[in-house]
Amino acid sequence: MFYLPLFHRLQGAACLVVGGGTTALRKLRWLLRAQARVTVVSPQISAEIRDLAAAGEVSLLEQTFSPELLDQRFVLVVSATNNPGVNKTVHDAAVRQGVLVNCVDQPELCTVIFPAIVDRLPILVAISSMGAAPTLARVVRGWIEARLSPNLGNLAVLAQRLRNRVKQTLPSTAARKTFWEQLFIGPIAEQALSGNLDKATEAAAALIEGSPVKTGQVALVGAGPGDPELITLKALRLLQMADVVLYDKLSNEKILDYARRDAECIYVGKQGPKPGMPPDRPDNRSNQQGSINELIVQHARAGKHVVRLKGGDPFIYGRGGEELEAAVAAGLDVLVVPGITAAMGAASYAGIPLTYRNLSLSVRFVTGHRVENTVNMDWPELTKPDQTLVIYMGLVGLRQIMSLLVEHGGAGERPVAIVENATYPEQRVITGTVADIADKVDAAKVQGPSVAIVGDVVNLAQPTISG
Ligand SMILES: C[S@@+](CC[C@H](N)C(=O)[O-])C[C@H]1O[C@@H](n2cnc3c(N)ncnc32)[C@H](O)[C@@H]1O
């Protein structure tokens, strides 16, 4: 390692930027964010830099750089020209004067380098490849950007607001450490990250004073239909914070890899033992909704961060509403994170637009789940044209559903697509019509989770890379 990452206070410090183009402007903006006093020297100066000068934010010297311009008043000089000769002259002058120097894209002429920055002020993450691969550093920045809540800075502001109070009330270092740990990973942090800084401050103040504060938290999190990349950034963050993850067979287990290694992942699938798992495992029984609700409450009451991971969206045929009611009735803090529902995942990955101008003006998500051997729906409504139906849980009753559509005046030639295992690598799309789709599905031996998309939009299907 030949660079040490340090954060340099530039507030009020004199800096020189050599160059008046786009690259100079980029560096200049960072220097201004750090509240440096910047002088730009260049025979040609862009309109944007001139605007900054007109606003009194920078000083201009419209001339070529000469070493006499650089003296020890300057803390840092940045050479942002595309002329290696000028850069070398700037570098040598800076070294003679003991001024820090950065020549853009010439690491051999730098005593300091600009990192790729993830800005969540007052939290700053700086990434460097030591000049070896700046583009890679920027790619890494993208990864980190995606991982950090846009409101992360709120946590630092919260800490700042509380610092003195914590010092006065909690004299021992150990007590302070426990307090901060509890704060940064608990529901109060979640409040701050959701933008409720004042509420979070109030709750944290109560925590300092020793008032009982609920520590457990329940998040009902949509896992999307399968492809693990379809979860939201918020879902990802909550999974990374979770102590306990309750999942069922509709959420892709690959998503569990996002959870902490020491998180307890409990299978709560309702439909019998999970394939490949010994049936006598305590987490491998046929779970009923009531016992899932109990598990959620029990773990959250024990102070754990519980993520109830749900296939698709928690509030679409997911019984998320009941879990929410149970958690709220138990007095727990709950949040619900939406997910991409199967209908949307299936349609996108199969290249079928759910609505289309002049062809399908609305879309209905309906359930084909049979109760007492029949499917109760408003059939005359469902047969109307100009709409798309997406039928969930309709595989078992598919033949009956299609007959009922025809019985109620629907067209037998209306197009239908069955999307099985939508968004998984093994996704299959079987197309047909209301009249023949059931036979086609039987012939294809469709067994995985499937939705039926019914409507003229099916004929618009286009190949996509993901499908
Ligand atoms: C109990 S519902 C859960 C729906 C889920 N909450 C959602 O928003 O997608 C289960 C039904 O969703 C549909 N489904 C879920 N995942 C699917 C997938 N990957 N491909 C196709 N259909 C899926 C199937 O119709 C399945 O029978």
Image: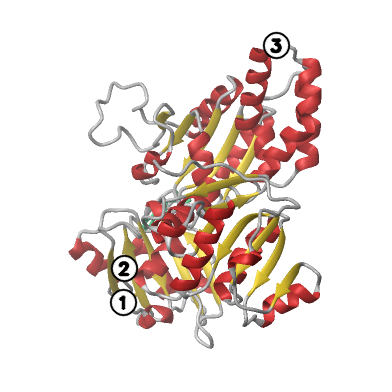
Q: Position of residue 27 (x, y in %)?
A: 59, 64
- State if disc 1 and disc 2 touch (CB < 8 Å): yes
Q: Residue at x 41, y 26 (%)?
A: 262
Tell me the CA gap for discs 3 and 2.
58 Å
Q: Amino acid at mark 3?
A: Ser
Q: Position of residue 142 (x, y in %)?
A: 47, 56
Which corner quadrant holds the N terminus?
A: top left
Amino acid identity at mark 1:
Pro
Say which amino acid is labelled 2. Answer: Gly
The residue indicated by pointer 1 is 463
Category of crowding for the residue at label 1, using alpha-carbon neighbours closer than 10 angstroms: few (below 14), some (14–19), many (at least 20): few
Tell me whether the residue at label 1 lies in contact with that at label 3, contact meaning CB atoms closer than 8 angstroms.
no
C-alpha gap between disc 1 and disc 3: 64 Å
- Label 1 or label 3, whichever lies nearer to me, is 3
Residue depth check, mark 3 versus mark 2: number of the one nearer the observer? 3
Residue of label 3: 172
Q: Is residue 456 left or right of residue 301?
A: left
Q: Quadrant of residue 332?
A: top right
Mark carried by residue 273: none
Q: Is residue 174 left or right of residue 258?
A: right
Which quadrant: the C terminus?
Answer: bottom left
Residue in the picture at 40% in, 36% down: 270
Say which residue label 2 marks: 467
x, y (%) of residue 448? 29, 53
Q: For this rendering, which residue is in front, 72 or 430?
A: 72
Q: Is residue 380 left or right of residue 53?
A: left
Q: Is mark 3 within 8 Å of ligand 1?
A: no
**Where's ligand 1: which quadrant?**
bottom left
